Image (cartoon, rainbow, N blue to C red):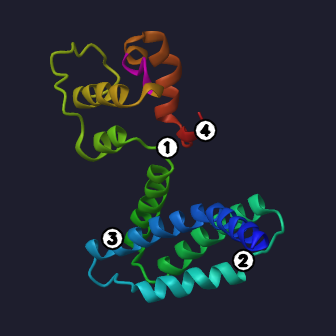
Amino acid sequence: MLDAEITAKRINETRESYRGIARRGSVLYFVIADLALIDPMYQYSLEFFARLFNRRLDKSKKSNNLDERIKILLEDITESFYLNICRGLFEKDKLIYSFLNSASISKRAGEISPAEWNCYLRGSLNDYSKEKYDVTCIQENTFYKLFALQDCNPNFEGLVASFRNSQDVATCWRKWAASDEPHKI
């Protein structure tokens, strides 16, 4: 009886370790299901999804180290679904699919807060028009959107002030705006 309890406990612990893989699968499934909202041709069955998911569990690289195995599965499943689904998408819809995948994964991981997501989708509910528009390097509507960005994420604290600082604008923002690779600056 004691052996059975120990075995059951070990099975439950192992099962819990793989819960992240199941979460990733559910995120990917709902992104794929939502593709039908973009174009009615993009309809994938749960059976197709389950078959592809189980195939990736079988065919992915194996490892005896649990953390490494989970990392392998997360990467393999995500990449495999992306490649398989992209085969059936129009070229114009591949970028939106990529965005939906990455945004959904980031939201699930808590890297994008609900406030940030709402700001991205709907803009801010606050009225910033009372703020003085006193910069020349960006348009007025962009200036007010910076306030919303600053309010929804503490990482952007001081963003508006950096546009008001003539030295920051001259050295940083103009260089960033003119760059071919702004993500690297």
| In the image, residue 184 above or below residue 168 | below
Front-lying residue, 84 or 4? 4
Residue 111 tag number: 1
Distance of label 1 from label 4 (alpha carbons): 20 Å
SS assignment at label 1: loop
Q: Which residue is mark 3?
A: 34
Identify the mark nearer the N-term, 2 or 3. Answer: 3
Give neighbour class at mark 2: few <14, some 14-19, many 20+ (Cα, 10 Å): some
Give neighbour class at mark 4: few <14, some 14-19, many 20+ (Cα, 10 Å): few
The amino acid beneath tag 3 is Asp
Give neighbour class at mark 3: few <14, some 14-19, many 20+ (Cα, 10 Å): some
The amino acid beneath tag 2 is Ser
Q: Which residue is mark 2?
A: 60
Q: Which residue is mark 4?
A: 184
Instruction: Give, as a single range, the part of the protein colored magenta.
Output: 156-160
Identify the mark nearer the N-term, 2 or 1. Answer: 2
The amino acid beneath tag 1 is Glu
